[in-house]
Image (cartoon, rainbow, N blue to C red):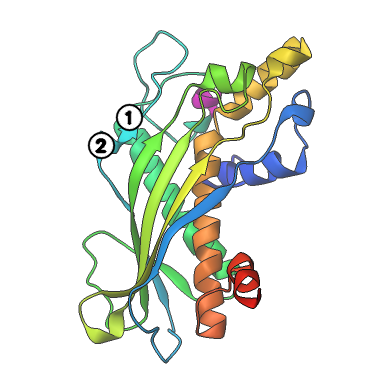
Amino acid sequence: MLVSITHAVRRTKFWYCTGLIAGCLTLFGCSSVSVQNERELRAMPAAAPKTIYVADFELNAQYFHSESGILPIAPQPSGPLGVIPRLLGVPQDPGARARELVNLMSSTLIEDLTNAGLNARHLRVGEDPPGEGWLVRGTFMQIDEGNRLRRALIGFGNGKTELQVVVSVSDMAEGLPKPFYEMGTITYSSERPGAVISFNPYAAASRFVLCGLDLDTNVMQTASRIASDIAERFRTGSPPRDLGTELLRLL
């Protein structure tokens, strides 16, 4: 039975960080998420929400820099197995690829929030806003698929992907969405060395395939970081403690 594309892409986090893909495993590393411009806009709601709603993040086409693909053919639309042609270097239709990333962000956020023990659900486009709960919404400020060949062969940050997101959380019990905090994140692909230094064509081929999932992994890692922040606020009723900030305060 074929797994869905969402499930297949979701499993790439496991591939990246556990090292089960042969050939380029010793050269491959996980990217990381940096939190920037985190702001407390007002006091957090006193009561914990029964439901956390996740809206699709906005994505302006002018901020999406898609890679043209390796093979000299016309971009192909996404489909149930759209991830497979992309792994092989087949170019994808930018519009379909953008929708794929938006859906991946929503589904990963909901999955990670649910795994954290919260009641999370998708607020679909056109659906009436709820009269209670928290609303998570955001905007893709920058998406760059980079240069896959440079990432695979050279590495060290060459041809890296870039993902910038701004997200806010609002309390819906007061009518119109009123964010009580927002944060920005920026995520890049791994800066590990590329496969060219190994002089191993199998490692190069394996790394090339895996690099086709770099941006998907960036999206999932960003969603996981956001979900972790929200879950901590839900449990404690306060912003997550930053260890670096706490140490400086004590000093």
Residue 227 seen in render = yes
Q: Position of residue 176 (x, y in %)?
A: 20, 77
The C terminus sits in image quarter: bottom right
Number of dots carrying numbers: 2
User: Which residue is located at x 58 percent, y 42 percent?
Assistant: 8
User: Which residue is located at x 62 percent, y 26 percent?
Assistant: 156
Instruction: Locate residue 109 relative to residue 141 in the image: left or right.
Output: right
Q: CA distance from mark 2 to mark 1?
A: 9 Å
Q: Which residue occupies the foreground of this view, 25 or 248?
A: 248
User: Residue beneath label 1, please?
Assistant: 94
Q: Position of residue 166 (x, y in %)?
A: 36, 55
SS majority, magenta: helix
Residue 56 seen in render = no
Q: Which residue occupies the foreground of this view, 100 or 146?
A: 146
* Residue 192 in which image quadrant: top right
Q: Does residue 90 lie above or below 63 as drawn?
A: above
Helix, strand or loop at label 1? It is: helix
Q: Mark 1: which amino acid?
A: Pro
The question of residue 128 being in magenta is answered with no
In the rendered structure, which disc, 2 or 1, sits on the residue that comes first in sequence?
Answer: 2
Span shown in magenta: 84-88
Q: Mark 2: which amino acid?
A: Ala
Q: Position of residue 151 (x, y in %)?
A: 58, 23
Q: Position of residue 213 (x, y in %)?
A: 55, 33
Residue that protrudes farthest toward the front in the picture: 251
Helix, strand or loop at label 2? It is: helix
Marks 2 & 1, CB-CB < 8 Å contact: yes
User: Residue beneath label 2, please?
Assistant: 61
Residue that protrudes farthest toward the bottom in the picture: 46
